[in-house]
Image (cartoon, helix red, strand yellow):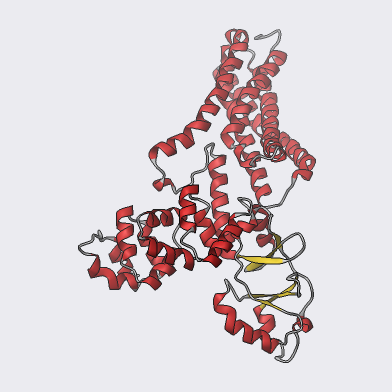
Amino acid sequence: MTIHHSLLKIEFTPDNIDLFSDQLNGLLPGDLVQLIESRELDEQQIIFDALSQTKSLNTFEYLPVWVQEDLIKDMPPKKVAVLLNALAPDDRTKLLENLHTEQKNLLIKYLSPEEKALTLKLLGYPEDSVGRLMTPDYIAVRMDWKVRQVLDYIRSKGWDSETINVVYAIDDYGKLIDDFRIRQILLAPLDSFVSDIADFKFTALNVDDKTETAINTFRKNDRVALPVIDAKDHLLGIVTLDDILQVSVESDTEDFQNVAGMSPLVEPYMETPFLTLMRKRAGWLTVLFFGEMLTASAMGYYEHEISKAVMLALFIPLIISSGGNSGSQASTLVIRAMALGEITLKDWWRIMRREIFSGLFLGIVLGTIGFFRVLTWGSFFNSYGEHYLMVSFTIFFTLIGVVMWGSLIGALLPLLLKRLGFDPAVSSAPFVATIVDVTGLVIYFSIASTVLRGTLL
């Protein structure tokens, strides 16, 4: 790691790269990835060209997709062909699916006939499906094999497999019958049959399942890999934990950016072009801005009440922020629970009932604080005139109503969007807050008109 830190400070050029070639080739792929990611494109190319073929192949598969795309743009065709054919099928699919059609078709021409057929098959599966993640490199055995035969087969074929931690048993038609952890094979008597250690129980993913389903399945099952089957239970491939972890990080990042009220970024924050970043942020900000304009319209509607009791305007930030905060909390909790598979659309009434009571409880807590705040200032400082007690009750009941309403909206929007086929995360905290701001004003002035009628109003 000492060599790695020293290399981080060096500016690599065509003139000095030969001096560091041996040091670069001595680094682990993970360290090389960190070094390459930290540089501009010109230096990335220089560093990568200095690597041996073996080291460049081992490093390329760990590089982020956007770095891979940049590197192959100016790479000699012969080197591109070597890299693409050496990539694992799932990693190659991940790279190609992000490219424009013209560039994708050009790179596919560099593949060998076998790899080309496999790649086109994987790209033929729906985007965001398990089929795009799977690899066909796995160990499959038969039930009538002896354990000794299985171990010999693993020794001969294991190098070509994505993982040998799990072994799969199939029948003559390629249907999945069972799966075994490698320890089950290693600890079984050599002359026993595979069928002797089978329990015929396994967890599998369907090739058309969404990646979200795969993530949740891995979370619920302690497995390093899961088989992928079709509608007739034929074993098509496997999905490994490392691929799921990467997809999970990407999915979580996208959800966080959606919740923040912006379109998801394809590249890292520092790598995203400025104009692209502005476009991603400006869209939702504009929508939210127009939404907040309704707040001004609502205030204009109650202009008469405000003119009679100007002090009511003092509590508007308090009211709408409390409702928006409660809505944001509920929205975040529901979105995350849905992402983890803890709740489904069928639980909508349980969720609504829970949020009604939660909103009521939280509203009473905040309402009580607001009540005594107005009461104290009105009693000792005469801040709110002679009717400060009625103003206190107005704030109390308003906070209960607004917080409870905010909790309901925050919980309902993700469920509604999910039901309509949209990403629940787009019911972001700012979006929920905007809705609650407008409706919160209506609740506030409606309660004020009732409580303060005959006094201030």
Quadrant in the picture for residue 140: bottom right
Q: Is residue 335 above or below residue 399?
A: below
Residue 304 image offset from top left, x and y in percent: 61, 7
Q: Quadrant of the C terminus?
A: top right
Residue 149 coordinates in the image, percent (x, y): 67, 87
Q: Is residue 408 above or below residue 443?
A: below
Quick one: which residue is furthest to the left in this view? 15
Give the image quarter of residue 445.
Answer: top right
What x and y, as percent, mark residue 119?
56, 60
Q: Seen in the image, is 226 located left or right of residue 384? A: right
Q: Is residue 25 above or below residue 371?
A: below
Q: What is the quadrant of the N terminus in the image?
A: bottom left
Residue 238 in view of the camera: yes
Q: Position of residue 334 (x, y in %)?
A: 67, 43
Q: What residue is at 60 percent from the left and 58 percent from the top?
A: 122
Work out whether residue 295 or residue 196 is closer to the camera in this orientation and state it: 196
Q: Is residue 225 left or right of residue 61?
A: right
Residue 380 seen by the camera: no
Rendered residue at 77%/41% (across/down): 348
Asked whether, in this view, residue 82 is left or right of residue 401, the answer is left
At x 59%, y 31%, the residue is 433
Exactly how many numbered labels are in the figure? 0
Q: In front here: 69 or 36?
A: 69
**Of 255 and 296, the residue lying toward us:** 255
